[in-house]
Image: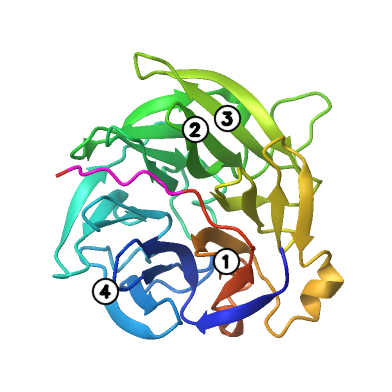
Amino acid sequence: MAGHRRLRRSTAARAPRRHHGRRRRTVYVGTQQWVLEPRKGPSKIFAYSSEGELLREYPIEGQDPTRGAGIVGRTQDGDGIIYALDRYPRRVIALDPKTGEQWTYATFHQVKRLCVDAPGLVLVTQCAIGDGVTFGKDGSMYITDVAQALIWRVPPGGGEAEVWFSDPRIESVFGPNGIEFLDEDTIMFAQSLTGPLHGFPPRPDTSRLLTLEIEPDGSAGELNTFWESKPGDGIDGFAIAESGNIYAALALSRAVVVVSPEGKELKRNPPNLLANFLLDVPMDDPASVAFLDDRVLVTNHTLFLGNPKSYVVYDVYAGERGKKPYRPHVR
């Protein structure tokens, strides 16, 4: 993984996704607020060309203006419909980028009892917060809940999300995050911080990439650790290459890490905090990762500082292409 350049400056960026079209590829970037930002809205999804030219913007409809806004994870289906995780109300939005039509595809409910639904607290208590999202081959949608320590499943066609997997081992202040399919029967997801409630000795400061097998009946199988990070890394989103290498955003250590198919760390970019500080625009809570040809796009979340100068999407040379995600037809 070589050096990186800035692709495009935009508003607070989160979750780049590329549209697989024959004539033109489009990169979609959603906006997200930092933790202490005043309540305002609406959120937007921006469409960019692969060269970074702004093509169109889509204001999100139906958000609660008194609660703030923020688009988190996103994905697409085989018809090019965009699916985005909203916070207020807690739902999955479907957006047709051709017409701009929007509708609610799925909804969530509160599972845990502890939920302080206030700015700066909603992320560190146990309010329902869908974070990462991906489609399975059969059209089922899988969504990580970063605060409630669980994975939701939405049936093909949408509806009420059901709890598909939950385990005390993924309980944390920041829990399940990015999620992708390794193969048809194996899900990989990120755990932003381990502990502090479980494990001996407790390691609340490391992160993990975890795998889950899907049983023949569709239920979740055995949970396994694929890779554990250094202390203080804070994994957010990730993308998988055709080679099996995993490119993960490390929000707290401000870098992108490459992990081999055998679960070994290969390289970081930038290699340390000093190198990051010397960048034209330093990484500040990098959040989401998506492949664009032989490069990866990385959003600069700046969740805790909220620095407008950091609202960029990085273009990082990877030298390999990404594994194509499932894009089922669900309508």
The residue beneath circle 3 is 211
The residue beneath circle 1 is 295
Q: Is residue 14 magenta?
A: no
Which part of the image, by quadrant, shows the N terminus?
bottom right
The residue beneath circle 2 is 187
Relative depth, front residue between 271 and 325: 325
Under mark 2, the amino acid is Ile
Q: Are marks 3 and 4 in contact (CB under 8 Å)?
A: no
Mark 2 Cα-neighbour bin, 10 Å: few <14, some 14–19, many ≥20: many
- Real-space Cα separation, disc 2 to disc 1, in angstroms: 23 Å
- Identify the residue at image location x=32%, y=67%: 66
- Real-space Cα separation, disc 3 to disc 2, in angstroms: 6 Å
- Left-right relation of 2 to 149: right
Q: Which mark is nearer the camera, 2 or 4? A: 2
Q: Position of residue 70 (x, y in %)?
A: 40, 64
> With respect to residue 256, does 325 lie above or below?
above
Relative depth, front residue between 325 and 273: 325
- Left-right relation of 226 to 166: right
Question: Is label 4 in a helix, a strand or a loop?
Answer: strand
* Marked residue nearer the N-terminal end (2 or 4): 4
* Marked residue nearer the N-terminal end (1 or 4): 4
Question: Is label 3 in a helix, a strand or a loop?
Answer: strand
- Real-space Cα separation, disc 3 to disc 4, in angstroms: 34 Å
Query: Which residues are drawn in magenta?
Result: 324-330
